[in-house]
Image (cartoon, rainbow, N blue to C red):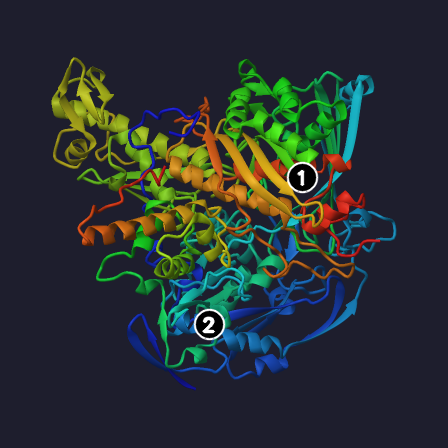
Amino acid sequence: MQIAVNVNGTEYSRVVEPRLLLIHFIRDELRLTGSHWGCDTSNCGACVLWLDDTPVKSCTVLAAMADGRRVRTVEGLERDGELDPVQQGFARCHGLQCGFCTPGMMLTARWLLDHNPDPSDEEIRAAISGQICRCTGYENIVRAVRWAARHEAAAERSQAGGRGDPGEGGEVA
Amino acid sequence: MTPGSEQISNRAYGPVPRKEDARFVRGKGTFVDDVALPGMLYGAILRSPLAHARIRSVDTAAAEAHPSVEAVMTGTTLAGRNLAWMPTLSADVQAVLATDKVRFQGQEIAFVVARDRYSARDALELINVEYDPLPAVIDARTALDPGAGVIRDDLAGRADNRIFDWSAGDKAATDAVFAAAEVVVAQDMLYPRVHPAPLETCGAVADLDQVSGRLTIWCTTQAPHAHRTLYALVTGLPEHKIRIISPDIGGGFGNKVPIYPGYLCAVVGTMLTGRPVKWVEDRSENLMSTTFARDYHMRGEIAGTRDGKILGLRATVLADHGAFNGAAQPTRFPAGFFHIFTGSYDLQAAYCEVTGVYTNKAPGGVAYSCSFRITEAVYLVERMVDILAGEIGMDPAELRMRNLLRPEQFPYTCPTGWQYDSGDYPRALRVAMDLAGYQDLRREQADKRKRGEFMGIGISFFTEGVGAGPRKQMDILGLGMADGADLRIYPTGKAVLSVSCQTQGQGHETTFAQLVAGELGLSPDDVEVVHGDTDRTPFGLGTYGSRSTAVSGAAAVVAARKVRERARIVAAAMMEVSPDDLEWSDGAWRVRGDPDQAAPIAAIAMAAHSGLQLPDGVEGHLDAGTVYDPPNLTFPFGAYICVTDVDPGTGEVVVRRFIAVDDCGVRINPTIVEGQIHGGLADGVGMALMQAIAFDPEGNCLGGSFMDYLLPTAVECPSWELGATVTPSPHHPIGAKGIGESATVGSPAAVVNSVIDALAPFGVRHADMPLTPAAVWSAIQGRPIRSDLAITD
């Protein structure tokens, strides 16, 4: 069947099998390999990407279901050559080790901050609780999201004439 | 600064951001499944639904007729190439594709190569296998019963399911200590079967160049060089024609040390088709067929005095290795390093016996950040110390403090022969107790008990031995456990370090650059670290058992120091002084008494590549290499305290706090060290509370997906509270010790001790992991359950 999907702002039209999973469409057809496949059962979240404006586990979404819709992957987080604050936060706060869960975690974090710019640690943990990281024990992922939230708040204050950079804040320590 | 930590003098060390992250946060990592080659085919494996059965026939005709299928292989195909069986890392053999019998559920039977992933899976459905089912041996405790079926009838002369009997320590001395002791307590305990479950499953892309005969394998391997040698020995291909590339790896934890049948099938697939073949297992395949960990049925006995002196320890272990003995460990240590089970205490005598058995379950045993079975050893001794504390009515912290090895006893030779290199154990425990507010917690616990609330405080103190070899004592299939490093210094003073270890998230590209930078006065940005490609790196045994910093890191430092000495000779020629007149300080060779007359490495490197007349002793250029054969293991240690709240009505356990004080010697990059500890602590919580691979009586695996094999998420984990002490290793070039497995080794006992402590008012002395709500509730009712089997009486 023919599908047309807008991925990270680019329109793609492909003929696919109706059973093709969205994660395989993104990875194998479009060769956007930042999204990963990890479990098949919607438990690990390595395959999380946005369908329209919502994070979904793309190992249990058919590519056909994305027909006519927008997809955002890790490759679409960077804007105008600048890393998203969430990406910066993960790097600054050592929010990743092997890097396999990282794209999915960052896409959920981006969604969280879009809906809750100042989440508590509990809210951050709840937001990523459908995803598994085997390396970090989640501690530095929480710190990374918190850093991104503070960074964005500071940037807004800066635009409004307030003070700018949130500073290192000892987050890496 | 973290409480208890000390300043690190080397200015290249410290929490520098990781070089790796630039690609990972952009989704630009290259994992095995990201590799796509022109004309690449896809493999899929047909697996046995039965745990034990004779194979009557395998009919592949319909699969071969599938329009997208290029090849179908069975055990018969492989037998024709003498590849139906392969050696394991424990000197056993394992079926690549079954020929005679299947011996565990999920065992490999046939391999389909097709033009796309989905067709390969479709074709598996077209293969017809006829089985004669056999009774399965699932419970290790019945594996040696006279009536138990012999699983390994492929091995000549095999009359039962015994793999080995092994012992360590002084039996007579231990018996004497126990006979004379005031108090002796015994406890049976199970360290259940768990699985490392890295988020990236195992896979390979094999590509044989038909013209040159060169075989390239992109593979999820933690030990690329050892794998290359094994592929050469198994396939008969010349080793110099084999290249193993271990690209970005999505977590290993020991799961990616062995060679799996799927890898070899991909290799045979490319041989048969002349095209690259990719095989990537799915999650169920990963959980059901690749190496598991633990499955240790242990009986511990501890002897002591009423006033709290621990005298002796005994352990009797039944080790379930599954259907093939594929444990990945130094070959001469069939129980790994379990006999370090005297732990951190000053004992008079200790003795352990381990019996290994075959069962109709997936092979393995040594994996999952266990430091070659030290996690089992730590769990045993730390549970026994708590049980003794309960028996004599002493606070478990007090009992530990009275019996910990004292700093002046190091180097210390333990009753089973390990020589611990360095430690200050009481200090680490004190730092942990201060961080926890131990006495306040005990008061809170007492108050809560009066109100009918049940909180627990659990302590674990661990000592690990990591960084194998020495090669004289430790090898894997004859390959000595040493590691190489090559260091090239380019004319402009930039450096490329090639190492034989391989990162699966540990951040070697950063840490090892810091090591070299620290020796040569460079910035870590000036050092590129090459790893995970056998064509570009020197030989060595790889990354597992916390050996990268301990062995490869040492190699990197030794190579850098060779470079520095070579640079000294060149610098002397540059400055027209004797090398003896130079001293290395502040990142440069300087003339003694005239420190302004100095040459940093960049200037020396340019001179070394120039027309400068070089004196004897240097051939030009500064490059150096080495192979590091560690003189001993390094012995990291730590004190962990876990605070839990237990709901006696539901059996639910909440880990409220976890305090971890680790001493891994000098920390090169404290942020990376702490990150590894965080991850290991989550593993410990997972193993203690939720992770287990159980089986039903027919051998059906009940942990075959993440729906059934539960891993901790962010909501089950507390915010970890870390502390540090620094006791350098006296024999490591910079005083570092391994850290990668410490938290996984040390933390399960702290969580279990905490839960059992909470349950003390109910008279519960022990319950086996995982302490799920059902297990905790059953323990409170006085009916503890066996967590390794689905069906109980």
Q: For residue B41, which numbered disc appears in the image?
A: 2
Q: Position of residue B727 (x, y in %)?
A: 46, 23
- Residues at discs 2 and 1 in contact (Cβ within 8 Å): no
The residue type indicated by label 2 comes to Leu
The answer to whether B679 appears left or right of A163 in the picture is right
Q: For residue B93, which numbered disc appears in the image?
A: none
Q: Please, which chain is the residue tagged with disc 2 on? A: B
Q: Please, which chain is the residue tagged with disc 1 on? A: B
Q: Residue furthest right?
A: B147
Query: Which residue is at a point 46% across and 72% down the rendered structure image?
Result: B41
For label 2, count other residues whose C-alpha is less than 10 Å away and answer few (under 14), some (14-19) or many (20+). Answer: many
Front one among B307 and B243: B307
For label 1, count other residues whose C-alpha is less than 10 Å away and answer few (under 14), some (14-19) or many (20+). Answer: some
Above-or-below relation of A105 to B684: below
Quadrant the N terminus of chain B occupies = top left
Q: Position of residue B658 (x, y in %)?
A: 54, 37
Label 1 sits on a secondary structure element that is loop
In this view of the protein, can residue A167 be seen by the observer? yes
The residue type indicated by label 1 comes to Glu
